[in-house]
Amino acid sequence: MFVGALECDVLLGDVRSLKQKRAVVRPVLADLRRFEVAAAEAGHLDLHRRALLGVSCVAADAGHVTALLERCERLVAARPELELLSVRHRMLGPED
């Protein structure tokens, strides 16, 4: 069993309140969940223009986990309302 995690630090566009931030972040998280992964806003909760999006998945094959997290990263990077500042991948396998 392999567990993969992805952290995407993003800068939001013209957002002036936490309510506007939620309106931008929620559709992105919903799109990520269509890949059958767990996705949540995991950081920068009190900042209006920043968000840390966390994605995780579990699979029997490390290649599948890697490919799935790369698809999620591309989805976030393709969103015009977000600027992807940094990305961090993590993988846990049977030896960990």
Image (tube, rainbow, N blue to C red):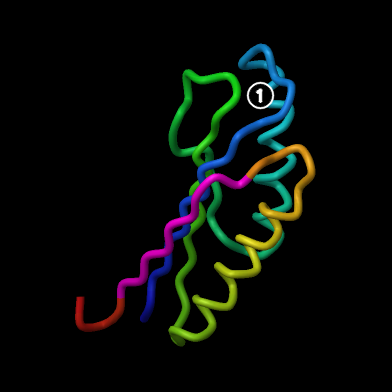
Quadrant containing the C terminus is bottom left
Quadrant containing the N terminus is bottom left
- Residue 37: percent from left, percent from top: 57, 61
Q: Residues within 10 Å of mark 1 (few under 14, many from 20)?
A: many
Magenta span contains residue 87: yes
Q: Residue at x 52, y 38 (%)?
A: 41
Where 41 falls versus 79 (above or below)? above
Q: Nearer the viewer, residue 74 or 32?
A: 74
Q: Residue at x 50, y 76 (%)?
A: 65
Where 71 falls versus 79 (above or below)? below
Tell me the SS state at disc 1.
helix
Residue where numbered disc 1 is placed:
21
Q: Which residues are magenta?
A: 84-92
Q: Amino acid at mark 1?
A: Lys
Total marks placed: 1
Q: Residue at x 26, y 82 (%)?
A: 94
